[in-house]
Image (cartoon, grey):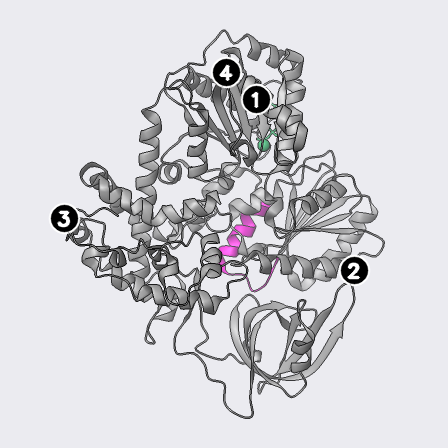
């Protein structure tokens, strides 16, 4: 870190936090490697690795007072233990307490020693999420500790911060390392990057105090406020994070806009040929957006345009029209999708549309290996007109001859940094490619301006004629058995079903477990039908195999985590059940539901919810039942929950904020913009350092 003129020039290595985490006592090479998987390489990365949430282990809840959906700490005595081997081994432990109620603990991953320790009579202190079970309530894989003798359980004095972590790094260990790093936190004079005058003008309090507070809330901390992220310390950090995002988007846009791009004009002959061959006419909205894109492409500045359009609104053909403008001008086009599944669908479409026009379409995904890959790479380097693939397109070794246009589908799986990398890839002869981003997540205009400050926005706000909306109902989980019976009946009619598990957890492991539980339950209930499973912890090959089997009709039911949210297309699937639907935002529910209703049969969507419903959840489910119009849903969402929900922060990894939440913190945005403009103009170096502080580690993480 360079010394700044406004601060003491003697900022030493220890104070700046730029030295390696390996310089902390007790952090050896193995731990350094593990930490780097989280983007935690420097001491300051640890300072800014903020808790995702807090666990309240400061009190014990009576089993009788537990409510499904809550996390709670319970003390109880083991009353019965059962080891089951149906479909997969599991350990069921019933515990009871003075409230004379029983809670079931379920373990799918356990060893013998563990099973033997949990004998009847053993006293346990457990912490976990409470869920509905067949009878009563349960916790799946709670944290627990055995209590000895009659000694009362000792509860914590402090809230426990929960950090995002990775496999092989337990929460205690990570918290310990962060604690050590905090001992090196310098005074504000060295830590603060926002100029003092701006801090004073906007009432920004000590950054150092804020960090210490969120990492180690004191015993008298207002628990409710902290749990909601509304404590002044959290708000102070959220401000800085939003500011950083604003600065980095503005910078990127300015940098890209200064570059030159190829002029992709032309006679439009190829487009005309494509349109003539299509079995449908463009909707007015497709026409309008297509024209907006064409105008951008004809400029010598790089286009940075986001095309948003509801699921099924026909974004692909708009992308194809843009591609043809580039091809006609003698430039190459790269189209990237976030998953192989989605990329393959584009490949099929583009081949069908472009090959009759004499335009070859190359396929370059992770699956393409060995000789086939070498040949494809060679053709791309020689100038193959259209190249379709996944992230693999951005990897080393893929060189384009004359890349003129990059199309990125379903933007929210790609980061801004990744988009930028594409610009670098395409540079040649001083020209950078144009960029077109397609997204099915409708984004209201005001929001688009703050969250996508680096992009212009076009909307396809009309669906092609003749779509039948999916019939949607909301059903209480208390009627789960009925729903499963309904699935059974649908299977007998030859229909295919998605069962989506939506547990939102800090680790993919817990999400996977939830899906495994549902998979076991449905396998047991749906006699005579095959039930598949797909979740984020499976290997790409396994996921693909499950998807292929479902597509081929070999599986009647596919149990999935939200990995299926984007772009999966199985027309025969006409029923979707979404578990815990009350927890999802409208945008994500809408995305998920878009996976059905693609074939000739009328489709249904069942929103299973866990009563009692809160007011907001009730309204969300109501909206889902009433409409399938993505734009109306997005507007309603903004009204109900504000911007964070609309953009699906954290849930989808889009705009991966550490502490800020656009919904909760929208009131900070005006000040963020004011400080941002001032810093870009007057304090560019501090602006760079802020970006490095908040985005640096994350960017390395994303690139790993
Ligand atoms: P999305 O916007 O979700 O990517 P697609 O581009 O995949 O939607 O289009 C969905 C379906 O609608 C495709 O089968 C496509 O061929 C068809 N389609 C696109 N535009 C029209 C149109 N104007 N009229 C009728 N069908 C259309
Ligand atoms: Mg699409």
| Real-space Cα separation, disc 3 to disc 1, in angstroms | 50 Å
| Real-space Cα separation, disc 2 to disc 3, in angstroms | 69 Å
Report the residue marked by disc 3: 6
| Image depth: mark 2 or mark 3 in front | 3
Numbered disc 1: secondary structure = helix
Q: Can you tell me whether the CB of the residue at mark 1 lies under 8 Å from the nearest atom of ligand 2?
A: no
Write down the quadrant of residue 220 in the picture: bottom left
Which of the marked residues, 4 or 3, is nearer the chain's N terminus?
A: 3
Report the residue marked by disc 1: 380
| Image depth: mark 1 or mark 4 in front | 1
Write down the region rendered in magenta: 609-626
Q: Could you tell me if residue 204 is visible in this image?
A: no
| Real-space Cα separation, disc 2 to disc 4, in angstroms | 55 Å
| Real-space Cα separation, disc 4 to disc 3, in angstroms | 49 Å
Residue at 59% x, 27% y is: 388
Query: Is 494 one of the magenta-colored residues?
Result: no
Dot label at residue 331:
4
Residue 255 location, x and y as percent? Answer: 32, 30
Name the side, left or right, on which 238 lies relative to 543: left
Write down the quadrant of residue 367 in the picture: top right
């Amino acid at each position: 870190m360079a010394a700044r003129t406004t601060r003491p020039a003697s900022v030493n290595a220890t104070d700046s936090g730029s030295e390696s985490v390996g310089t902390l006592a007790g952090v050896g090479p193995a731990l350094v490697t593990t930490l780097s998987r989280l983007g935690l390489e420097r001491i300051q990365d640890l300072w800014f690795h903020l808790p995702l949430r807090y666990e309240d282990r400061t009190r014990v809840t009576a089993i009788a007072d537990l409510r499904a959906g809550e996390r709670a700490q319970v003390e109880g005595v083991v009353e019965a233990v059962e080891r089951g081997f149906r479909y997969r081994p599991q350990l069921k432990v019933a515990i009871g307490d003075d409230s004379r109620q029983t809670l079931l603990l379920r373990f799918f991953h356990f060893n013998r020693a563990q099973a033997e320790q949990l004998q009847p009579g053993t006293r346990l202190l457990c912490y976990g999420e409470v869920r509905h079970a067949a009878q009563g309530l349960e916790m799946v894989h709670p944290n627990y500790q055995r209590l000895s003798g009659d000694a009362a359980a000792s509860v914590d004095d402090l809230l426990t911060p929960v950090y995002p972590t990775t496999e092989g790094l337990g929460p205690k260990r990570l918290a310990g390392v962060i604690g050590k790093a905090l001992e090196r936190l310098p005074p504000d004079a060295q830590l603060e990057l926002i100029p003092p005058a701006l801090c004073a003008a906007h009432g920004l309090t000590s950054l150092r105090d804020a960090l210490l507070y969120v990492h180690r809330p004191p015993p008298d901390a207002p628990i409710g406020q902290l749990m909601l992220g509304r404590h002044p310390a959290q708000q102070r950090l959220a401000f800085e994070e939003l500011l950083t995002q604003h600065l980095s988007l503005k910078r990127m846009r300015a940098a890209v806009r200064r570059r030159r791009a190829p002029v992709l004009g032309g006679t439009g002959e190829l487009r005309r040929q494509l349109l003539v061959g299509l079995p449908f006419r463009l909707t007015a909205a497709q026409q309008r957006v297509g024209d907006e894109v064409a105008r951008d492409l004809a400029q010598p500045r790089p286009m940075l345009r986001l095309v948003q359009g509801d699921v099924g609104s026909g974004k692909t053909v708009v992308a194809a029209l843009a591609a043809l403008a580039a091809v006609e001008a003698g430039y190459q086009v790269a189209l990237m999708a976030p998953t192989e599944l989605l990329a393959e669908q584009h490949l099929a479409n583009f081949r069908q549309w472009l090959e009759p026009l004499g335009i070859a379409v190359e396929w370059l995904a992770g699956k393409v290996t060995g000789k086939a890959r070498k040949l494809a790479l060679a053709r791309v380097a020689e100038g193959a007109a259209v190249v379709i693939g996944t992230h693999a397109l951005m990897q080393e070794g893929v060189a384009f001859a004359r890349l003129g246009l990059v199309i990125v589908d379903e933007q929210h799986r790609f980061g801004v940094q990744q988009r930028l990398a594409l610009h670098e890839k395409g540079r040649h002869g001083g020209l950078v490619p144009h960029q077109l981003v397609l997204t099915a997540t409708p984004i209201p205009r005001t929001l688009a301006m703050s969250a996508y400050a680096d992009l212009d926005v076009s909307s396809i706000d009309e669906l092609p004629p003749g779509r039948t909306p999916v019939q949607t109902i909301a059903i209480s989980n208390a009627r789960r058995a009925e729903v499963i019976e309904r699935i059974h009946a649908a299977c007998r009619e030859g229909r295919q079903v998605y069962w989506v598990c939506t547990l939102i957890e800090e680790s993919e492991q817990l999400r996977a477990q939830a899906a495994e539980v549902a998979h076991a339950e449905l396998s047991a209930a749906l006699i005579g039908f095959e039930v598949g499973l797909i979740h984020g912890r499976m290997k790409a090959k396994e996921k693909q195999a499950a998807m292929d089997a479902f597509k081929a009709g070999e599986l009647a039911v596919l149990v999935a985590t939200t990995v299926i949210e984007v772009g999966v297309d199985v027309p025969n699937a006409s029923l979707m059940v979404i578990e815990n639907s009350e927890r999802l935002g409208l945008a994500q529910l809408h995305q998920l539901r878009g996976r059905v209703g693609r074939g000739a049969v009328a489709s249904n969507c069942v929103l299973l919810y866990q009563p009692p419903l809160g007011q907001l959840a009730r309204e969300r489910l109501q909206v889902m039942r009433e409409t399938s119009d993505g734009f109306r849903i997005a507007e309603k969402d903004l009204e109900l929950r504000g911007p964070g929900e609309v953009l699906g922060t954290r849930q989808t990894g889009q705009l991966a904020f550490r502490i800020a939440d656009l919904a909760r913190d929208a009131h900070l945005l005006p000040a963020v913009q004011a400080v941002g403009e001032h810093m870009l103009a007057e304090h560019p170096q501090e602006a760079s350092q802020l970006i490095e502080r908040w985005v640096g580690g994350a960017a390395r993480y994303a690139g790993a």
